[in-house]
Image (cartoon, rainbow, N blue to C red):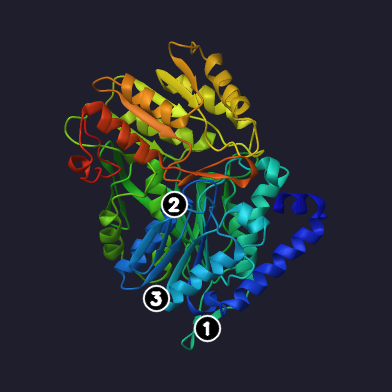
Amino acid sequence: MKSLIRALTPAFILDRYHWALAKLAAAKFGYPSEKMIVVGVTGTNGKTTVSNMIGRIMEEAGHKVGVATTVNFKVADKERLNDAKMTMLGRTKLQALMAEMVSAGCTYAVIETSSEGIKQHRHVGIHYDAAVFTNLTPEHLESHGGFENYKKAKGELFAKLARDPMKVIGGVKIPKVSVVNLDSLHAPYYLSFGANKKYGFLVDRAAAVKVAGANGMYGTHAGGMTDAEGKPKEIQYPLGIVKALDVSVTPRGSTFTVRGTPFRVHMLGLHNVENALAAIAYGMSQGVPLQTMSAALEKLQGVPGRLEAITVGPRQDFDVLVDYAPEPESMRRLYEVVAMLPHKRVIHILGSAGGGRDKDRRPVLGTMAGSGADVVIVTNEDPYDEDPHGIMEQVAEGARRVGKEEGKSLFVIDDRGEAIARAVGMAQVGDLLIVTGKGAEQAICVANGGKIPWDDREKLRAALRARFGIEADAASAPSPAQGEINH
């Protein structure tokens, strides 16, 4: 019925309805965002990880923190997985969650703020004090009507930050903060919005950063921010620059320094160094000492479903990784990590989401898996109202283009559980099995708004226990950290 009503309602009326509902929800729960410092994290990739890193940093600094992400909800010391199958909760549920944070004594709230959520005005009833931009690559283009609209949707978080007045908590004015990835070509756009404090972060690659100015730091960056001739664009406003030096990325995690302070993150890949820098930059804006932030990030073993290693005990003689990686850039980053890890064959299970979501990326994902893995298993993911077989065929076609052969190096298996069991059954000593598309999501979305309870990690553990004859109780030990693989 809801779908029919949406289809029959003019877009502008639906838009105003969503806007009004956001305002009403905030009022209903007593405007909880007015009582906490609220951080919005946006971007194509890394939002969940950055949100959790910021949360841990602020906790280490002595604050009670609330976090709301694609993966998890955290209210002070209580944490649970996100079972709503939504990156950003609907207006009423999100306001209720923030009210719960206030009741628990949280002074900070970190809200993963998606472009889809912004498009539907879920952010309207939230008074943000900071906006963090991770990166931007093509995604949700059909929904937004093109890349530029997608970029501007995320820009609305920064625009709202600039529009809204400074918040006063306990008689203290809370300055507005923006944090932007300087390695992104789109950094100048997000930095153009007003804020009291602006921070940019980047990893020391070939790009150079020059810092000068007595009244603040002014940066010239030769990476993402260049003009049409490839010359560095000068940033014409105060900008605190957070740069990772002495970067070492290994199969056991990464180390780097920021302003002479050593950091270690257990999560794999250079992109997780970038994620850490975003969190560090925000921590700096709040006056958190670098040593405190270093301790916080070293304690963070990982984020559920983000490069999460799955093990059931010492009998397991091949490695298993679960990662979200739903689009080409995140899959590229995943294969950067795969290239570092010791392995024989790579077996990759993947699919692609339905519901009209970025259909063009389906064969691209298949091609990337076909090029990077020895065996590709295409299966169902979240078909919504689309034909799952059609989606799978589009992904499989991409794998065929790079030489994968049906029944030998390419398998199309409708049932995701069966696909996982097949992959676990065919894995040999020293192989690496990766499962992407869902991470720690708790449901498969099917037609007519239906949801099938699901967890790739639990399905893998069950299949591994069956393969190695391990009882469930004997396999209750936690998996190693995301940066720690068995072999």
Of the residues shown, which amino acid type is indicated by label 3?
A: Ala
Q: From the viewer's perspective, is the residue at label 2 or at label 1 nearer? A: 2
| Mark closer to the chain start, 2 or 1 | 2
Secondary structure under the numbered disc 3 in the rendered image:
loop
* Residues tagged 1 and 3 counted as in contact (Cβ below 8 A): no
Task: Name the residue at 81% across, 58% down.
Answer: 12
Looking at the rendering, in which quadrant would you find the C terminus? top left
Disc 2 versus disc 3: distance between alpha carbons? 21 Å
Labels 2 and 3 touching (C-beta < 8 A): no
Amino acid carrying mark 2 in the image: Val
Q: Earlier in the sequence, mark 1 or mark 3?
A: 3
Closer to us: 163 or 56:
56
Q: Could you tell me how far apart the alpha carbons at marks 2 and 1 are, in whole angstroms? A: 31 Å
Residue 53 placed where, x, y %? Answer: 38, 57
Read off the residue under disc 2: 71
Mark linked to residue 168: 1
Viewer can see residue 280: no
Q: Is residue 100 left or right of residue 256?
A: right
Mark identifier at residue 421: none
Helix, strand or loop at mark 2: loop
Helix, strand or loop under label 1: strand
Q: Which disc, if any, is residue 104? A: 3
Answer yes or no: is residue 9 visible.
yes
Mark 1: amino acid: Val
Q: Quadrant of residue 165?
A: bottom right
Q: CA distance from mark 1 to mark 3?
A: 20 Å
The answer to whether 193 is drawn above or below residue 71 in the figure is below
Q: Is residue 281 left or right of residue 388?
A: left
